[in-house]
Image (spheres, rainbow, N blue to C red):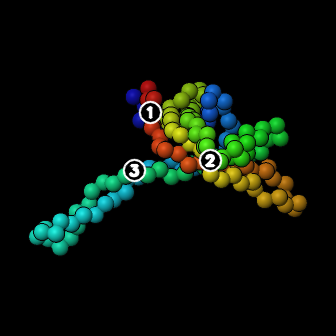
Amino acid sequence: MNDNPVVNFHFSVSFDDVIGGFSEITGLKAKHEILEYRSGDAPNYSTIKVPGLRKYSNIVLKRGTLISDNSSFSWFDNIGLIVEKRDFTIQLLNHQHEPTIVWQVRNAWPIQIDFSELNAKKSEILIETLELAHEGFTIQRLGN
C-alpha cells in the first residue's frame, strides 16, 4: 500500500468518451446541512442537531479557449425548458498516466460561461470558464 499524498496537477476530464483538456477544476465539495430541533417538552433549553440534506458545490472547469471547439458554449446556449444533463468523469492521474482517484459527477449542466478579459496590453491565453450545477458525485480511490 502506498501512503504517499497524491499530487493534484495531472488530471483528465471526460464527457461521454470525449476527453477535455482543462487547466483547473474547483468545486469538488459536498456537505450536509444541519437541522436543529427541540421538542417542546425537552427538559434542556438547547436544540439537538441532526444531519439534513447533502449539498454539492458547483464545479468550475477552466481551459484555454480553442478556436475549433465551441462545445461548451453550444451546451450552455441550448439550455431552455429542456436541460441536457450530462454525467462526466474527473480522473486524477499518477506519473504513469493511470487514474488514482476518480470522481463520477451525475447530471451536470452549465449555469455560467465566462471568458477572461480582452486586454491589448497583455499577452495571455484567453481562458474559458464553465460553471456546472450537478446532482452529486462519487469518489473511487484506486490505491495500489
10 Å neighbourhood of mark 3: few (<14), some, or many (≥20)? Answer: few
Counting from the top left corner in percent of width and height, residue 43 is at: 11, 70
10 Å neighbourhood of mark 1: few (<14), some, or many (≥20)? Answer: few
Amino acid type at image mark 1: Arg
Q: Is 80 or 115 nearer to us in this picture?
A: 80
- Quadrant of res 36: bottom left
Q: Is residue 50 left or right of residue 133?
A: left
Dot placed on the residue nearer the N-terminal end, 2 or 3: 3
Q: Which residue is mark 3?
A: 54
Q: Which residue is mark 1?
A: 141
Dot placed on the residue nearer the N-terminal end, 1 or 2: 2
Element assignment for label 1: strand
Q: Of all residues shown, which one is farthest toward the bottom?
A: 45
Q: What label sits on residue 123 in the rendered view? A: none
Residue 34's place in the image compared with 74, above or below, is below
Who's the residue at 31% across and 60% down the image? 35
Which label sits in the foreground, 2 or 3?
A: 2
Query: Could you tell me which quadrant the C terminus lies in?
Result: top left
Who's the residue at 74% across and 50% down the image? 127
Dot placed on the residue nearer the N-terminal end, 3 or 1: 3
Q: Is residue 92 visible?
A: no
Counting from the top left corner in percent of width and height, residue 142 is at: 45, 29
Which label sits in the foreground, 3 or 1?
A: 3
Who's the residue at 45% across and 37% down the image? 139
- Quadrant of res 18: top right
